[in-house]
Image: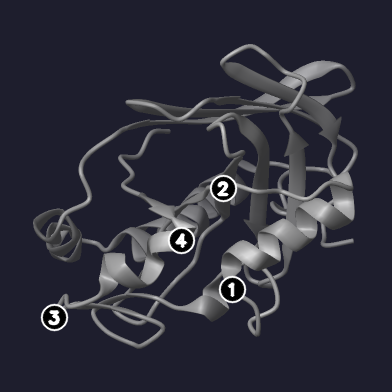
Amino acid sequence: FKYRVRMLYLDLDDLKSVFAKRFFWSYDRLNLGCFLRKDYFGDQRDSVKKSIQNEIRKKLHFNHHGKIYLLTNPRYFGYCFNPVSFYYCFNTKNKLEVIISHITNTPWNENHAYIHDCRHIKEPMKTFKFGKDFHVSPFMPMNIRYEWSFREPGEELVVSMNNIHDKEFMFNASMKLQKKPLTKKSLNLLLLKFPPETFKTIFSIYWQALCLKIKGVTFFSHP
């Protein structure tokens, strides 16, 4: 199945200015469209950027300095759900050092971060192989391997996620986005899209789950 998606690619240093002085949008305040700190990674007492840098220090044992960009959906009409948000962390020379995939499941609303160290990968397409350790879909077992690939963001942004079970390909989820300017007009147009992106996302998840259930696909309970 295929869906058209629209996401925001946000500089974490500019969050307040992006949404400032926009009648229908706001930062950390409810509006038709808004960016609320509580919807994103880390301790809400810290900024999102500081939380990401703390996670890098904790897991990869180095101090990150530079820009961090967040690929996500904001809150539309009071509702926010992101199955995954991606944090692209660049150093001061604009080299991609780390990608963090922040996963949220439903209906449990649990979250988990996978950290991908890009520092020693020279190719534009960064590929990572690792084991699954967070329950997402009841139609996917826990004993699978992931092979995720990320193309460095430019005019296009590409993410491809393969699920491997018993050394055999099982499932792929891919996303290819085209870069568009972030302006007052483009933000307001997002509010006119129906259904709003976050509503469409959650509906699509449960619709596909229903289709799989009807087909009799094996169901795996939350561990």
Q: Nearer the viewer, mark 2 or mark 1?
A: 1
Residue contact at pointers 3 and 2, CB within 8 angstroms: no
- Residue 100, how many percent across, how many down? 67, 46
Q: Secondary structure at mark 3?
A: loop
Whether residue 68 is situated above or below residue 29 in the rendered picture: above
Left or right, 167 with respect to 152, comes to right
The amino acid on which the numbered mark 2 sits, given as a three-letter code, is Phe
Residue under label 1: 47
Q: CA distance from mark 1 to mark 3?
A: 24 Å
The amino acid on which the numbered mark 1 sits, given as a three-letter code, is Ser
Of callouts 1 and 3, which one flags the residue occurring earlier in the amino acid sequence?
3
Name the quarter where the N terminus is drawn: top left
* Front position in the image: 209 or 165: 165
Residue under label 2: 86
* Front position in the image: 192 or 45: 45
* Front position in the image: 140 or 136: 136
- Residue 24, how many percent across, how many down? 17, 78
Q: CA distance from mark 4 to mark 2?
A: 16 Å
The amino acid on which the numbered mark 4 sits, given as a three-letter code, is Asp
